[in-house]
Amino acid sequence: MNLLKSALFFLFCLATSQGYCQYTEVINSNRPGVSRSAFSVGTNVVQFEAGPYFIKEKRTPAAAYEASGFGIDFAARYGLLWEPLEISIEGTYQNDTQTYTSTYDYEYNRSNFKFFTIGAKYLVYDPLKNKPEEKPNLYSWKANRTFKWKSLIPAVSVYLGGNIDSADNPFTAPGIEGFSPKVMIATQNNFANGWVFVMNFIKDRIGTDQSDFQYILTLTHAVTMKWVIFAETQGIQSDFYADNLFRLGGAYLLNKDLQLDSAITFNTKDTPSVFSVNFGASYRLDFHKDKKPKVDNTVEDEENGIPNNVGNTDKKNATPEPIEKRKKEDVDFD
């Protein structure tokens, strides 16, 4: 019975820890999907996420073509200054061969960044912030697994960044080059039993001829303490390209700082059809340090071990009286 209580308490802490602070004891990766979590990696945490992929495209209507090749998705994330703030560099580089199947077949080799962005994300609303910690019911397994309506209120973050596109990029519309803004709203719901639902709404390359709107919906489920599975849908709409992509996959937590993952991507149209397989990993360098609360509500910085104030909080910089003097005052000679 004691073992069951301990297990329930530990699982509950894992399910709710992300809501009370940005930093988590285990790595918090955006992979293997392409959606972005509402939460940051935590202050002084450097995180790298990358994965190679193989892709095949086939367009049936004119102008018919086939394309196959490989690429790599990558991201570097850093928690800067405050817990809700994260800065990041993200991109996708692809190298493939496009073969047009017309009267005279010819091949076209392509290689460039499909996108390269630099930006910052900030958590503007956390429904669990400043709320008392909800303790698990150690006597009822059913009560701990019951759906809670308040979990429908998501955490919300905003992202502001920019694309950097090179001239004559075969993966972008003609004339797209230089800097263009990108904005995003990311929401996240942490449900009971290891379910997490993330939504992204993105306006990309604002002010250009390839200003597209995207939505990404990702549902993740922790099957065990180590294994996670996910399903995702991504909609893209612009004058240059439109698609509805679906992804399925999973991830394995090798240790608290390293995650391995894999996924497949596909769509249901032929202009072109898309099929991709990717493998990846996420790794963090954890330099995060919590501030220790003290009994008198002062805070001690772990880095230097020096408290913000000492002694009586009503008298700034007051020095404690000598022990011998206090002893004498305690004696009543009358």
Image (cartoon, helix red, strand yellow):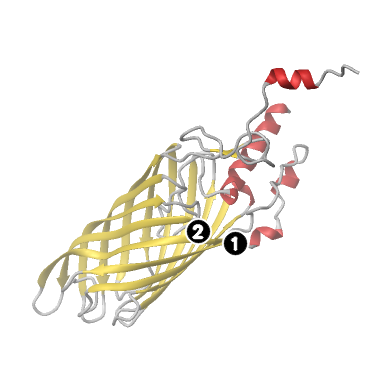
Q: Residue furthest front?
A: 334
* Res. 327 image quadrant: top right
The amino acid on which the numbered mark 2 sits, given as a three-letter code, is Ala
The amino acid on which the numbered mark 1 sits, given as a three-letter code, is Pro
Relative to 90, residue 103 above or below: below
Q: Which of these two is toward me, 107 or 88?
A: 88
Relative to 97, residue 73 above or below: above
Relative to 257, residue 199 above or below: below
Q: Residues within 10 Å of mark 2 (few under 14, many from 20)?
A: many
- Tell me what residue is drawn at x 24 percent, y 78 percent: 173
User: Residue 80 in the image: x percent, y percent?
Assistant: 42, 52
User: Residue 67 in the image: x percent, y percent?
Assistant: 21, 66
* Res. 312 image quadrant: top right
Q: Secondary structure at mark 2?
A: loop
- Of mark 1 and mark 2, the one earlier in the sequence is 2
User: Residue 217 in the image: x percent, y percent?
Assistant: 49, 64
Left/right of residue 127 with respect to residue 40 in the rendered view: right
Q: Which of these two is toward me, 42 or 110?
A: 42
Disc 1 target residue: 154
Relative to 62, residue 149 above or below: above
Q: Residue furthest right?
A: 334
User: Residue 140 in the image: x percent, y percent?
Assistant: 77, 41
Decide: marks 1, 2 in contact (CB < 8 A)? yes
Q: Secondary structure at mark 1?
A: loop
Disc 2 target residue: 38
- Tell me what residue is drawn at x 29 percent, y 81 percent: 208
Name the disc covering residue 319, or none.
none
Left/right of residue 214 with respect to residue 62 in the rendered view: right
Left/right of residue 206 with respect to residue 173 in the rendered view: right
- Quadrant location, the N terminus: top right
Q: Which of these two is toward me, 321 or 265?
A: 321
